[in-house]
Amino acid sequence: MPDREQKGPRERTNPFILIPLLLFGVYVIYLVVWLPFRYGAETGLVESAYRPPPAPDGEAEVFDYRQLRQPSADLIAEGARVYRLHCQSCHGPDGRGDGPASAGLTIKPRAFDSPVDEWRQGASVLEIWETLRDGVGAMPAMPALNPRQKFAVVHYVHDEFMEEWPEDSPEAIAALPEPAAGVDITIDPYAQPRVPLRYAMQKYVEQALEADNGEDGGGGG
């Protein structure tokens, strides 16, 4: 009679059975971790750049363009934050037009230490502000920024990267709008769904290629 304690040959588990379980685990990690991270990376910064519309019964911020045209320590500090969020990826941390997003662009972003006579739109305060408002060449408009943020980043660029720049013309100063509420853009950023950052960068590249085929010159500024 065989000993009850004696065991027969142990049946080995097929290691290939574990592969589907491993793949399923990786897929779960992808759904739980990577997808939310990718969503945040592509859309979080873009959405955070927009100010929510004011409440119907609330007071909208009033922007005094003539006052904002004058640099101040507070505006320069705010401009540094705006630059890091919206400009550094293309223009680079040192303002040389060598940011990581510029690698695939045919027309390179403006290097801020380049001679001011090479700036297509001009390098004065109001001229750079108009570039941010309207865009020029391969440089897109920046509707996500309100007037104060646009002026702030202009003052930061002047203070941080440039040794000299031209003065605004009296005609340009006289043409400034009176203090007003709202944003100085020609499109409504809330009228359409906000686009992912990847799509925006793709459109930027397309604009750069179109500008390169149409005319020569520096990109932006």
Image (tube, grey):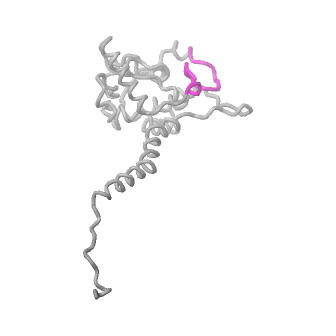
Q: Position of residue 195 (x, y in %)?
A: 49, 30
Residue occupying the far right of the picture: 57
Vertical position of residue 46 compared to residue 19: above or below? above
Vertical position of residue 173 compared to residue 158: above or below? above
Residue nearest the observer in this picture, 199 or 113: 199
Q: Is residue 86 left or right of residue 16?
A: right
Q: Toward which corner of the image does residue 100 lie, by quadrant?
A: top left
Q: Position of residue 122 (x, y in %)?
A: 40, 18
Residue nearest the observer in this picture, 146 or 167: 146
Secondary structure predominantly adopted by residues drawn in magenta: loop
Please give the name of the residue rendered at 38% of the width and 20% of the height, measured from the top-left corner. Answer: 207
The residue range painted magenta reads: 175-192
Residue nearest the observer in this picture, 116 or 121: 121
Labels in figure, total? 0
Please give the name of the residue rendered at 46% of the width and 50% of the height, measured from the top-left corner. Answer: 32
Which quadrant is the N terminus positioned in?
Answer: bottom left
Q: Toward which corner of the image does residue 139 lie, by quadrant?
A: top left
Q: Is residue 48 magenta?
A: no
Q: Is residue 189 magenta?
A: yes
Q: Position of residue 70 (x, y in %)?
A: 52, 28
Q: Toward which corner of the image does residue 120 lie, by quadrant?
A: top left
